[in-house]
Amino acid sequence: MSAPDRIEVTYRVAVGRDRIAAVAADIAIEQSVELPLAAVHDRRVLDEVVGEVRSITEVAEGLHQVVIGLAIETLSGDVAQGMNMLFGNTSLHEHVQLFDVDFPAVVARDWPGPRFGLAGIRALTGVEGRALTCAALKPQGLPVDQLAAMCRTLARAGVDVIKDDHGLANQAQAPFVARVQACQRAVEAVRRETGSRVQYVPNLIGSPRALVEQAHVAAEEGCGMVMMAPALVGLPMFAQMVAEHLRVPVLAHPSMGGAARIAPPLLFGKLYRLLGADAVIFVNYGGRFGYSRDTSMAIAEHARAHWPGVHAALPVPAGGMTVERVPALLADYGPDTMLLLGGSLLVAGEALFERARAFVSMVQGQ
């Protein structure tokens, strides 16, 4: 079979040299026909459908990188089936990580991809030539009026994008509809006062029916962006929401993204982008999560990398970042980035405006 008919999938496998050849062959079979080759009697299936071990490379003692060629026809142009073929049964093996995928154009076009991407978010916010600023409304448990007041303060301080915390859903203290109405009106009032193009981003979360209803509410209220966590709502549902129910940029949240052994640069930087995320939140190094600098930078690079036919996504490092680290973060990630701060701003309490303004000034002066 010719190379264009295969998708190359890279796995990291934690086994020794004496076992790696057999394990690699098992992955190729498991992710294609899922039965012993002796049970495959059809010549076309043997030649064109059974997975191929393309290469095995030792990365470190006891760790190998295995590249498998899988038949594109087995993905069937469907997100769920695509993920099934990339890492379905093999994800049940604790010693295997899905590390990377080389998506041919014929596969990528079956997935939504960002409709707005980095350039579209710049056009929406009117921010050019610098990084964007983002803040989160939290904690859950606050009533609607307090969240709206927080949103108004952050908008007045000049923050470009103000999003719901991913923990804000449809709780009794701040029901989704009331919260979206109040926060959207807060940013609209600031826009009228200052001429800014600040965006409020509601968090869509729940069952498929709830997601569609929330998307309608966000559209009716005039929200210019929304947020969803693909791993929580389901990758196929995320892609369907982007393709069928949303007409604004989508910010992908990483919650639950650590539950599967998929390399973060692939999951957040490449798969979420291909599923339709216009911007991707991910864990920044040196915060409260354990990502290395190399991992965080690789996610950002995957999100922005040139990909024919697929818009670049806006990388959004987050997770325990502080105002004081802003200059170093800008030096690392560059201007095509949106820095997301939460607790580092909100810890200021009554001085929230001043703290947020200092954050904005640092980024605007980059």
Image (cartoon, grey):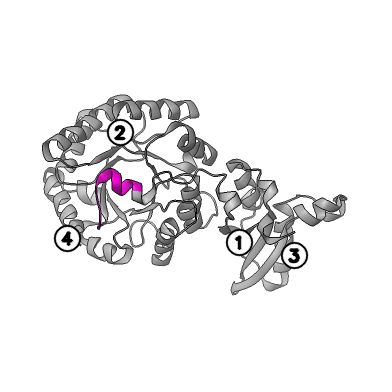
4 or 2: tag closer to the N-terminus:
2
* Crowd class of label 2 (few under 14; some 14 to 19; many from 20; radius 10 Å): many
The residue singled out by tag 2 in the image is 223
The residue type indicated by label 1 comes to Thr
Q: Is residue 36 visible from the viewing direction of this image?
A: no
Q: Which residues are magenta?
A: 120-130
Q: Which residue is mark 1?
A: 10
Q: Do labels 4 and 1 touch, CB within 8 Å?
A: no
Earlier along the polypeptide chain: callout 2 or callout 1? 1
Question: Which quarter of the figure has residue 317?
Answer: bottom left
Which numbered mark, 1 or 3, is in the foreground of this view?
A: 1
Q: Nearer the viewer, residue 145 or 67?
A: 67
Q: Which mark is residue 159?
A: none
Crowding around mark 1 (Cα neighbors within 10 Å: few <14, some 14 to 19, many 20+) is many
> Of circles 4 and 3, which is in front?
4
Q: What residue sits right under mark 3 in the picture?
A: 22
Image-based side of 314 in relation to 94, left or right: left
